[in-house]
Image (tube, rainbow, N blue to C red):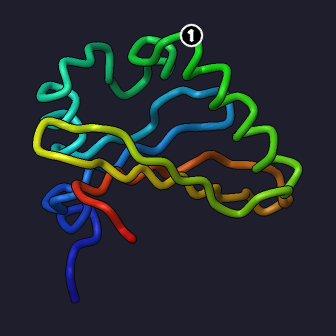
Amino acid sequence: MCDVTKVWENLNTALIVSDPDFNVTYANQRAYTLFEELKIAGLEVGKNMAACHQVATMTKLKMIYQDFASKKIKINHLTMDGPDGTLTIVNVPFYNEGGELGGVVEMVFEGSLA
């Protein structure tokens, strides 16, 4: 059996978890490294994602989280340019025992998934 925490820490994919209020609750080492490579400051567990995103991005994220909360969508993805090519960003919600939005897991894949 493996230690799941070690799996997430050693994953070569950036992984960021946030609560419904956009507070970062977990980020693996690849996330910190990738944010450095992208010259995006402010990623820190316990801080709000607004610290590392532009206002326009936060506006889009708020709409996505609202759609997750109302269960209009089950997944969200987009692509952007990264330091070594395309980055594919996938956001997946998780829900608490009462069925309310518990937060969102964001995975940043270095490359296209298509």
Q: Is residue 1 above or below residue 46?
A: below
Quadrant of the frame with the N terminus:
bottom left
- The residue depicted at 48 percent of the width and 12 percent of the height is 54
The image position of residue 38, as x and y in percent, is: 19, 26
Q: Say what amino acid the circle numbered 1 marks.
A: Val
Quadrant of the frame with the C terminus:
bottom left
As drawn, which residue projects farthest toward the bottom?
Answer: 1
Q: Is residue 106 above or below residue 8?
A: above
- Specify whether 10 is left or right of 49: left
- The residue depicted at 85 percent of the width and 56 percent of the height is 72
The image position of residue 66, as x and y in percent, is: 80, 38
Residue under pointer 1: 55
The image position of residue 99, as x and y in percent, is: 84, 60
- Specify whether 38 is left or right of 48: left
Q: Nearer the viewer, residue 41 or 110?
A: 110
Q: Nearer the viewer, residue 57 or 11?
A: 57
Provide the secondary structure element on which disc 1 rests. helix
The image position of residue 90, as x and y in percent, is: 48, 55
Count up the numbered dots: 1
